[in-house]
Image (tube, rainbow, N blue to C red):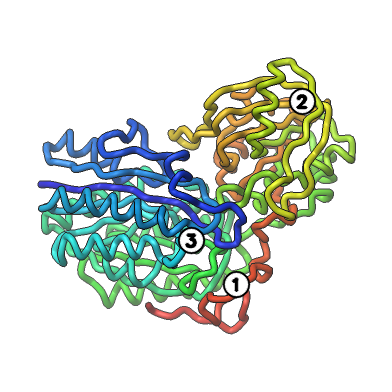
Amino acid sequence: MRIFAASIGTETNTFAPIPTALESFHEMFYAPPGQHPDDAKLCTAPLWVARRRAKAEGWTLIEGTSTFAEPAGLVSREAHETLRDEVLGQLRAAMPVDGVLLGLHGAMVADGYDDCEGDLIARVREIVGAAVPIGVELDPHCHMTKKRVRNATLIICFKEFPHTDFVARGEEVVELTLQAVRGKIKPVMSLCDCRMIGSFPTTMQPMRGFVDKISALEGKDGVLSISIAHCFPYADVPELGSRILVVTDDRKEAGDRLARTLADEFLAMRGKTTPDYHSPDEAIDIAGKESGTVVIADPSDNPGGGAPGDSTVILRRLIERGVKGAALAPMWDPMAVRLSFMAGTGGKLRLRFGGKTAPTSGLPVDALITVKKLVRDATQTFVDAKVPLGDCAAIDLGGIEVVLITKRAQSMGIDLFTGMGVDIARKKIVVVKSTNHFHAAFAPIASRVLYCDSGGPIPRDHRQVPYTRVQRPIWPLDEAVQPIMV
Ligand SMILES: [Zn+2]
């Protein structure tokens, strides 16, 4: 048995000011065939799982390229076509194969391509023919388009947000694809469009219960897998929106009925799935009355959703209000990192940092700072994965400590702070830039978690997103909506 595996991923915020180029993939994560490190990355779990299983079970895995770019703006046509054709060339060279495994993100949009993953999967299908199973793992913040569902054999999304289950779902993709290759199952997919845009952290109700419910439906009555495609709200593409995908063992009608029922239930949760978003001052006020460490998340400047990650809006209010005992990370500013390295550990300098990329980033901060700690090629941890941060500098503004980073990333692991010598357990306020991935690592150390909207480029109210091409009607742009089978 010969299986081919590859991975191309990024999440494209078509409204974001930072372009995504070929070098964005090479800088963030790029592993040529056979060079993938021995830990699973967010979008590469199928390849990593398959490598272990091939070794244990004695079949042949042909590894293609694995690459991922930090979420940002539109992907260049060159980047998409180059990476796509690289993987397709590897697949052609590997033929004949019995199955294909793809670890993709699912919200990659390039110049001229609204659906990069659909384009890739369709071309993979052309090469391998109709009979060879193609198993795909996607992030739930994806556009679950008709094209990719038509051309893949099975697609499975992470269920959790934070995405702590990316390896577990990758194991399912590999297991079900192998079963399909061996003729033990015949996966068929049923897709229902909920006509809804939203954010769905699984750390709170009612979403927590919904995920537990669909998980309990799997593995019986011919249901192989159920995915909730949350949607990725910050892309101006026609097929944006929440969708339910049911994979059954050759039970299309039952799968369709279940997808439609679950879509009704999911749509009924609209408006009830997000936490309260405070203004920066409200969040600081609430934190001031709490004992212990309060974590304030700023999803509106989340680099994980394509925002620059250099907003100074909350930091400026902390400084102006004279708050002491606070820490903030990350702040993306490669130039400020470089100046901090030039000053050296313990160095003092008048530093201008942050607030450079867009009007929504706020203005740069000018402060007399002390360089507290410098680390080359720092990382933070998400579950078992190491997330690169590039060269980093922890700076002290006199009661407020900030971690400056070189490679854009959202706040995921507490080692983002502690690895830079910032003792967050002793801080009153810890500000992170993240929608919900921070929650897995930071909630356990927090006396309270608050969510804040600093007016960054990822508005929490989706009615403020300047869509022009999204299918209508769709909630919350339109009130009267109902699910539609796709
Ligand atoms: Zn995601």
Specify whether 347 is left or right of 185: right
Q: Quadrant of the C terminus?
A: bottom left
User: Residue 400 at what x, y percent from top left?
Assistant: 79, 30
Cβ at disc 1 under 8 Å from ligand 1:
no
- Extreme residue toward the right, this view: 321
What whole-number distance in Å separates the C-alpha atoms at marks 3 and 1?
29 Å
Of 352 and 254, the residue lying toward us: 352
Cβ at disc 2 under 8 Å from ligand 1:
no
Which residue is depicted at the point 70% across and 53% down?
Answer: 358
Specify whether 143 is left or right of 82: right
User: Residue 323 at what x, y percent from top left?
Assistant: 85, 35
Amino acid bearing label 2: Asp
User: Residue 58 at what x, y percent from top left?
Assistant: 11, 37
Q: Is residue 111 above or below residue 344?
A: below
User: Does dot 1 land on a helix, a strand or a loop?
Assistant: loop
Disc on the earlier residue, 3 or 1: 3
Which residue is the site of mark 1? 467
- Extreme residue toward the front, this view: 78
User: Residue 83 at what x, y percent from top left?
Assistant: 34, 51
Judged by depth in the image, the label closer to the viewer, 3 or 2, is 2
Q: How dense is the environment of label 2, judged by Cα within 10 Å: few (below 14), some, or many (20 and up)?
A: many
Which residue is the site of mark 3? 210
